[in-house]
Image (cartoon, rainbow, N blue to C red):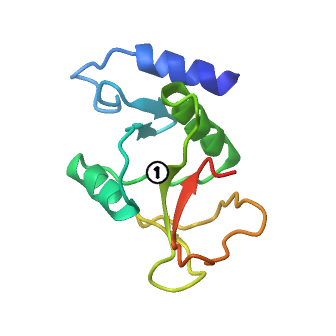
């Protein structure tokens, strides 16, 4: 797909230290944003903290194109497409969803009958069947 090509091209891109708009090595650039996939099993808060340690947040997704890119990045690193945390949370107030980076939640792609809070979950991940 086009997004698989974007990911491949981005991963082959060599970082130039004189290029302030370039992403760090190993990150994927899309439009003006940089994305990094890390395959570490942990809870949502620990994953967000790990991102903060490198000056980032769990991913916020604002369009179908970004959603497809994030899916492609995950697929490139995890062919099983296991559940992967994203930055959306609603832990502070039920059904009041927001992104951990502070951006507005204007795009969602919930699975059928979600969110339902049946198990008290208030954090969001992708790749859940």
Task: Name the residue located 55 percent from the left edge and 74 percent from the top edge.
Answer: 97
Q: Quick check: 17 above or below 124?
A: above
Name above or below for residue 47 compared with residue 71: below
Res. 106 image quadrant: bottom right
Instruction: Using residue 80 as the reference point, say whether residue 86 is left or right of it.
Output: left
Residue bearing mark 1: 59
Coordinates of residue 68 in the picture (x, y in percent): 65, 39
Mark 1 element type: loop
Front residue of 108 and 45 = 45
Image quarter where the N terminus lies is: top right
Where residue 39 sits, quadrant-wise, is top left
* Residue 84, position as x, y percentages in the image: 50, 48
Along the line of sight, the residue nearer the viewer: 61 or 114: 114
Question: Seen from this angle, which residue lies furthest bottom?
Answer: 93
Kindly identify the residue that appears in the image at 57 percent across and 76 percent down.
119
Residue drawn at x 51%, y 73% is 122
Instruction: Give the x, y percent position of residue 28.
Output: 44, 30
Q: Nearer the viewer, residue 34 or 110?
A: 110
């Amino acid at each position: 797909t086009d997004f698989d090509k974007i990911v491949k091209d981005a991963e082959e891109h060599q970082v130039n230290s004189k290029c302030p708009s370039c992403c760090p090595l190993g990150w994927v650039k899309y439009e003006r944003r940089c994305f990094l996939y890390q395959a570490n099993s942990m809870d949502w808060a620990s994953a967000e903290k790990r991102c903060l340690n490198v000056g980032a947040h769990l991913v916020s997704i604002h369009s179908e194109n970004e959603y497809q890119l994030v899916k492609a990045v995950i697929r490139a690193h995890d062919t099983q497409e296991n559940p992967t945390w994203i930055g959306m949370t609603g832990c502070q107030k039920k059904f009041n969803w927001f992104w951990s980076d502070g951006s507005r939640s204007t795009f969602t792609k919930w699975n059928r009958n979600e969110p339902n809070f049946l198990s008290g979950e208030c954090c969001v991940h992708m790749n859940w069947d």
